[in-house]
Image: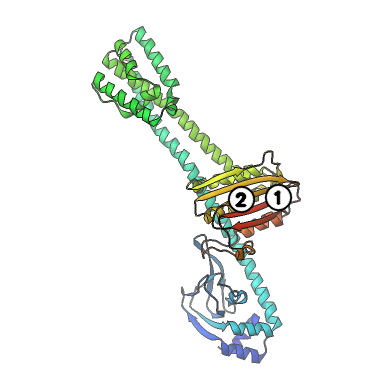
Amino acid sequence: MSHAFLSQVPLFADLSEADLERLAQAAEELHIAAGEVLFDEGSPGQHAYVIAEGELEILKAAEGRQVLLAVRKAGDVIGEMALLEAAPRMATVRARTDGRLMAIPKDSLDRLLSQSPGAVNRMFQNVLSRLRDSQTMLRQSEKMAQLGLLTAGVAHELNNPAAAIQRSAGQLTQALDQLVAGIGRLGLLKLDPNQEAVLAGLTERARRHVTQSLRISSLERSDRSEALASWYADQLGKRAQPEVIASLVDIGLAPDELDQLAQTFSGEQLEVLLDTSARIAQVFGLVPEIGEASKRVSTIVGSLKSYSYLDQAPVQSVDVHQGLEDTLLIFNHYLKEGIEVHREYAEDLPRIQAYGSELNQVWTNLFDNAIQAMQGRGELRLRTRQEGDWVIVEVEDNGPGIPEEHQAKIYDAFFTTKPPGAGTGLGLNIVYNIIVDKHRGDIRLKSQPGRTVFEVMLPLQAEVRD
């Protein structure tokens, strides 16, 4: 490939004919087929590439998927950032079409930059522009990943009460059908006044005593169920339905009470009476279950609304404890799998002026990092306190810690200790920007094996800025 082509590339426009010729001689012409990968994210970099023909995709692995950052075309230079930083490739490059490239060795690129101030300036502008573009794309990807995490967490939390409502509603429908049938059968029994009085007392007892099941141990419930089933078989000559026995236990009936009822009612009357009483207990037992499950749904929706600061101004008076708790709810599914949360909240912690929804992004990122560091099992400690004009929040985990050589870089954009695809390298960068740049606060790290603490400092009264 002649130096005539290189002279048309903006990066090399200021080079002399002799330098262009040397660069052309050092370069190697490559052909790449559509769909072929030129290099992978995380691989070492030995060459920069000038695209002569075709199109190449720049792909960044993030949260288990690949994000398309850019499409490079003829005349573009790619792969130079890894050479400048002497770092692994930050992205994967794959051919969108068949292409032809010029591979420039690292030493030739280093010599070029040392001899041409114009090339240095163009390289700096090129790298800065690409960093900005990549950061914008990956920030959007990070937000989508957080949205996915939020959705998954809320969906899981809603699933349990929603399933309980659906299950209880189905059981309630069945119990009501059976209760209506039982009432019809009672009407045909032609009870005398004394029997009707006993019936009224038993049905009222069924209505009032359905909560007794909460105060009976599993062993005691099993013993009572077995005793009632035996009585049913011996005295009525029938096998009672399990749900009827369970409801009679809830009512608190015992075999000796059934013996007394047997003296007042005939076998047929007693069977209908007990079945109807059991159905009444079922109905009045299911209604509170539906109410509690509905209340749980309402609580989750309320917490989600509070988490997102829906229908509120961007800057408001923020209850830090409420923000922490709302965020914990989002992670509840992950926490209850093996992470114990310890709260050491200061009493009467004052509210602060802040961007509430963005502070919750901070807690989301810090909690997510802690959970991943502990691999889903460990202890998460949350501490709050006031020091003068500052509110301090500490998020501590007992994971393996952050190596000392990495601690100075953790807030840098794209820096990550995770393998390619496991993170964007923007989570803590977003945290830093929200706390330091937007709220004029501070964030500090203390980490050693078995203990990592992020200390967030937020001013009580601050002129937050965009």
Residue 174 seen in render = no
Q: Secondary structure at mark 2?
A: strand
Instruction: Tell me residue 63's x, y (percent).
Output: 52, 59
In the depicted structure, whether residue 158 falls above or below residue 82: above
Q: Is residue 135 left or right of residue 272?
A: right
Label 2 sits on what residue type?
Val
Instruction: Tell me residue 34's x, y (percent).
Output: 46, 75
In this view, the residue in front, 440 or 17, is 440
Q: Earlier in the sequence, mark 2 or mark 1?
A: 2
Check the image and name the residue furthest to the front: 449
Q: Are marks 2 and 1 in contact (CB under 8 Å)?
A: no
In the rendered image, which quarter contains the C terminus? bottom right
Residue at x 65% of width, y 51% of height = 358
Q: Is residue 236 left or right of residue 37?
A: left
Circle 1: is it few (<14), some (14-19), or many (20+) Cα within 10 Å?
A: many
In the depicted structure, whether residue 294 falls above or below residue 462: above
Which residue is denoted by mark 1 in the rendering? 458
Which residue is denoted by mark 2 in the rendering? 395
**Disc 2 and disc 1: Cα gap in Å?**
14 Å
Residue at x 64% of width, y 73% of height = 127
Quarter occupied by residue 202: top left
Label 1 sits on what residue type?
Leu
Residue at x 52% of width, y 34% of height = 295
Q: Secondary structure at mark 1?
A: strand
Marks 2, 1: nearer the viewer = 2
